[in-house]
Image (cartoon, rainbow, N blue to C red):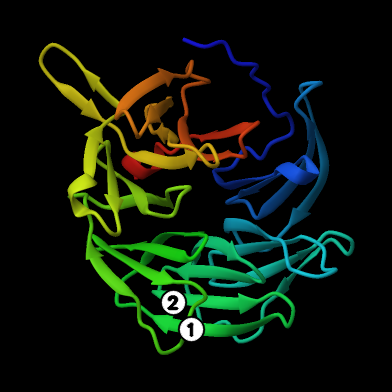
């Protein structure tokens, strides 16, 4: 097993962490949580230092976060989604959250991603929306039949995972005359996370039953799935949800994070496990992000899901 420099971030929310985003070019890390906090950290990988810069408090739990790098002279912008269905522009200078106009969602914004000058959001009530960051208005809106669980955009494609084992994809930019292509999910149980491959030729999705499916848009014969995040004992087997996925940019190396508290590394070209990182604590791995230099792992206690 490779030796990794591990730095535990101090002053992190004690509530359930909902999202983590690395701003590699600016050496900043964003963490959102169910207590409504957005925490911004400065980091230096050479010095192995992570320092809290700012904490903003929202009135409702925050579910998702993303960074948009608009064209022209616009500065990078941070967007969040909350449990009430609001899409929020984060104003760090004023220390407040600004709701986007024209947003139709009434339930939680489960997932956000960016494409050029737009932020794309998916909600629990099935709304897929595109927001122009320059005008702060909704420019695309489509109602899907099921709850949106996870979305991702890469190059010229958008992929969306919903309940009832459905996966949709769209060519980008989004067009109001195009309703997307529905494909059958490669997973039997509910999807937890979906990510496009760095090359944009396919996507990877993970499920509640410890499985990861690798699908391709053009060549269906290349698809495969594998089991992971399981504990095999003599007379039984424990299966853990695979909550998080993250690629090393421009590579076939995939990290998976599960409710067993483990992070595993896979080479999708060779279809082999590269390594398993040392377990960080007894909590579940709930979010991952990787910029090629830094891998961010968020762990939280998700036992409330089974103890409720």
Residue 284 x %, y %: 44, 32
* Residue drawn at point x = 47 percent, y = 28 percent: 283
Q: Which residue is mark 1?
A: 141
Note whether 153 is above or below 213 in the view shown. below
Q: Tag 1's secondary structure?
A: strand
Q: Nearer the viewer, mark 1 or mark 2?
A: 1
Q: Which residue is mark 2?
A: 127
- Of labels 1 and 2, earlier in sequence is 2
Q: Residue furthest right?
A: 93
Which quadrant of the structure image shows residue 151? bottom left
Number of numbered discs: 2
Residue 295 x %, y %: 59, 32
Is the residue marked by circle 1 packed among few (<14), some (14-19), or many (20+) residues within 10 Å? many
Left or right: where does residue 208 sit relative to residue 1? left
Residue 224 x %, y %: 22, 41
Tell me how far mark 1 sits from mark 2, CA to CA: 7 Å
Using the image, tell me which numbered label, if any, was put on residue 191: none
* Residue drawn at point x = 82 percent, y = 68 percent: 74
Left or right: where does residue 122 sit relative to residue 77? left
- Asked if the residues shown at circle 1 and circle 2 are in contact, with their CB atoms under 8 angstroms apart, the answer is yes
Residue 76 x %, y %: 77, 60
Q: Tag 2's secondary structure?
A: strand
């Amino acid at each position: 097993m490779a030796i990794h420099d591990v730095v535990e971030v101090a002053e992190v929310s004690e509530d359930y962490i909902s999202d983590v985003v690395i701003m590699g070019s600016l050496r900043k890390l964003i963490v959102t949580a169910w207590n409504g906090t957005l925490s911004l950290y400065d980091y230096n990988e050479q010095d192995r230092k992570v320092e809290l810069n700012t904490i903003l408090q929202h009135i409702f739990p925050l579910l998702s976060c993303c960074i948009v790098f608009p064209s022209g002279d616009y500065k990078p912008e941070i967007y969040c989604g909350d449990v009430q269905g609001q899409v929020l522009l984060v104003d760090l200078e004023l220390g407040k959250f600004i709701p986007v106009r024209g947003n139709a969602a009434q339930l939680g914004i489960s997932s956000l991603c960016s494409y050029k000058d737009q932020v794309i959001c998916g909600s629990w009530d099935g709304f897929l929306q595109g927001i122009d960051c320059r005008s702060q208005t909704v420019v695309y809106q489509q109602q899907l039949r099921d709850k949106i669980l996870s979305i991702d955009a890469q190059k010229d494609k958008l992929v969306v995972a919903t309940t009832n084992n459905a996966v949709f994809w769209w060519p980008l930019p989004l067009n109001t005359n195009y309703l997307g292509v529905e494909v059958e999910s490669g997973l039997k149980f509910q999807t937890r996370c979906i990510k496009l491959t760095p090359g944009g030729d396919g996507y990877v999705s993970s499920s509640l039953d410890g499985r990861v499916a690798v699908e391709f848009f053009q060549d269906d014969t290349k698809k495969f799935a594998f089991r992971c995040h399981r504990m095999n004992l003599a007379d039984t087997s424990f299966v853990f949800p695979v909550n998080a996925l993250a690629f090393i940019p421009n590579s076939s190396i995939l990290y998976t994070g599960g409710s067993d508290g483990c992070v595993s590394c896979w080479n999708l070209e060779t279809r082999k496990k590269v390594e398993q990182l040392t377990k960080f604590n007894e909590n579940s791995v709930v979010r991952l992000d990787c910029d090629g230099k830094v891998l961010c792992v968020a762990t939280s206690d998700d036992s409330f899901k089974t103890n409720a």
